[in-house]
Amino acid sequence: MNGAGHRAAHMGFGMTPIGIDLGTTNTVAAWVDAGGEPRVLYGSDGNALIPSTIYFETPNVVQIGQDPFQNPGMRSENLAIQSKRWMGRPRSFLFHGREYSAVELGSLILRKVIKRAEERLGDQVGPVTIAVPAHFDVAQRAAVHQVAELAGVKLHAIVSEPVAATLAYGMPHAGSLYKGLGDGEPTMVIDLGGATLDLSVVTCTADIIDVPVVAGDAHLGGMDFDRVLYYHLCHHILDETGIDPADLPEFRFRLLDLSRWAKETLTYNTDVTMSIPDTWLEGRECTSLELTREGAEALWEGLLDRADRLLEGVLDDARERGIRISRVVFSGGASAIPSFRARMMERLGPVVAQSDPLMGSDEAVAVGAALYGQMTIPGKQSEPVKFPTLHEHLPYDLGVADDVGHLVVVVARGSALPADGEHVFTTVEDEQSQVVFRIVRRDADGAVTLLGELRLDGLPRVPQGDPDLHVKFDVDAQGALSISAWEGDRQPVKLHVAFSGDLTALRPARRGKKLIVL
Ligand SMILES: Nc1ncnc2c1ncn2[C@@H]1O[C@H](COP(=O)(O)OP(=O)(O)OP(=O)(O)O)[C@@H](O)[C@H]1O
Ligand SMILES: [Mg+2]
């Protein structure tokens, strides 16, 4: 399609908003057409999913969205995968001697999505609604803002993935708002993606969308199911041929891809044959392995148990708050695995599963993000709609690590947003003139992350333990945190938290040569 010509023709007629699921493994975009119908954006290759990969072919040329398994020539040291895991976290990646933050990597993927969408729609794209996991904290959400800024696109809103998935299942037509879901019945959203499992309870009435419970396992996803089949295959190859695939990196790569294919095939077929072509081992003796669906399920037992335990915990959590789940929504590509669904349904008991034949589970989040944009961007609705208020709960404790490393919780997990909290600290040394507050988050599983540090200077020179050092946290409805601190009766000082993630995210921006994005 001639994108440039079309764009010129449409100039001045506004832009097309899109919704984006910036996944760890795959990125998907969707939009809503003039009839209010949500549509997934496909590339010229017919795929909706863009692998969230970046290949630094040379210092100045990057290829976005290439499946490394289909391109075995790629050198792994030049390949960035799963950068979403590091959003808002102080880590950088080195390619051809240049440092990149997760924000920069994310913005390269976003640029690719926008480019593809503009080619497909023949229109300029914007503003965008980006979905993020419900448990994303302030630093991670701030990083997503920077991703959009670096990509040069206006960000309309960040919406949480389970809310987006719920909207996608409950509102296939933007015109038929709240049908089905507007009844306030609690929905369990189960999202098994490539790398993570996220469980969330979402309730939705005409006035409020609420996410009272979230939990997740950042190390349980479709890739782990692949890996189990891969190890099984490796044992078989070693037994049959004496070749250890671990010694042959390229071979390993292809076997992992074969395992992924086998996993996906077993969703639709009851058995699969993993055949290894002669060419993979340059004429050396080859082999094949047959696997039944039951056989694979037995191998996956450990993973399925982990998912089951996580769901059990979420159901307990919900029950304690008097919430009874009455339906389930499956999101994420790997939630198509039949044994996974069966285990989840067994644990949930007789609830009603919902499905929408219009889309695959790996497209639901992008479709929901597009619908969210359609319903909340002023002037985009054909008739006036009142969108329910998003009502989120803090999915982690926010607090300050004291001098001995203990966490003092200032705003507790589960607090309805917006929320605030205050705590009084004091000095640990005589005549201490400054204190450093270490702001941390603690997840439901006990994992602690340092979000940033802030300093209060100019304290009075008095004995240890004398000053009253007040710290107040304000978390807004979107989960953004602002902090004020003051000493004694003095005026509060509004402090901006220097999130560690932000600092690294900003540093390499617009530095070095311009990249050519393929
Ligand atoms: N039919 C299928 N059966 C089983 N697994 C599938 C099927 N289709 C896709 N998958 C798996 O889904 C996973 C990718 O899911 P998805 O695109 O939802 O991930 P993501 O959103 O990028 O990751 P995450 O949610 O962890 O950030 C891959 O592991 C893929 O193999
Ligand atoms: Mg996902």
Image (cartoon, grey):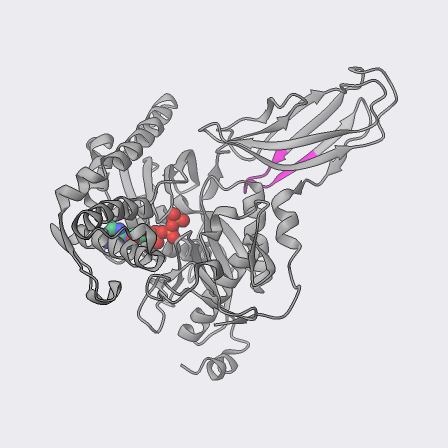
Look at the image and tell me in which quarter the N terminus lies.
bottom left
Residue 364 makes an appearance in the image: no
- Residue 380 in the image: x percent, y percent? 47, 62
Q: Nearer the viewer, residue 516 or 31?
A: 516
Q: Quadrant of residue 313 in the image?
A: top left
Residue 500 makes an appearance in the image: yes
| Image label count | 0
Q: Nearer the viewer, residue 188 or 342?
A: 342
- Residue 210 in the image: x percent, y percent? 43, 37
Is residue 187 positioned above or below 460 on the image?
Answer: below
- Residue placed at 60% from the left, 61% from the top? 97
Is residue 114 positioned above or below 503 on the image?
Answer: below
Is residue 389 positioned above or below 358 on the image?
Answer: above
Q: Quadrant of residue 283 in the image?
A: bottom left
Magenta stretch containing residue 247, yes or no? Answer: no
- Residue 486 in the image: x percent, y percent? 77, 28
What range is drawn magenta here?
Answer: 474-483
In this rendering, position of residue 34 left or right of residue 515 = left
Magenta stretch containing residue 475, yes or no? Answer: yes
- Residue placed at 53% from the left, 48% from the top? 87
In this rendering, position of residue 315 left or right of residue 15 = left
- Residue 319 in the image: x percent, y percent? 34, 24
Is residue 118 positioned above or below 221 on the image?
Answer: below
Q: Nearer the viewer, residue 225 or 444?
A: 225
Q: Quadrant of residue 173 in the image?
A: bottom left
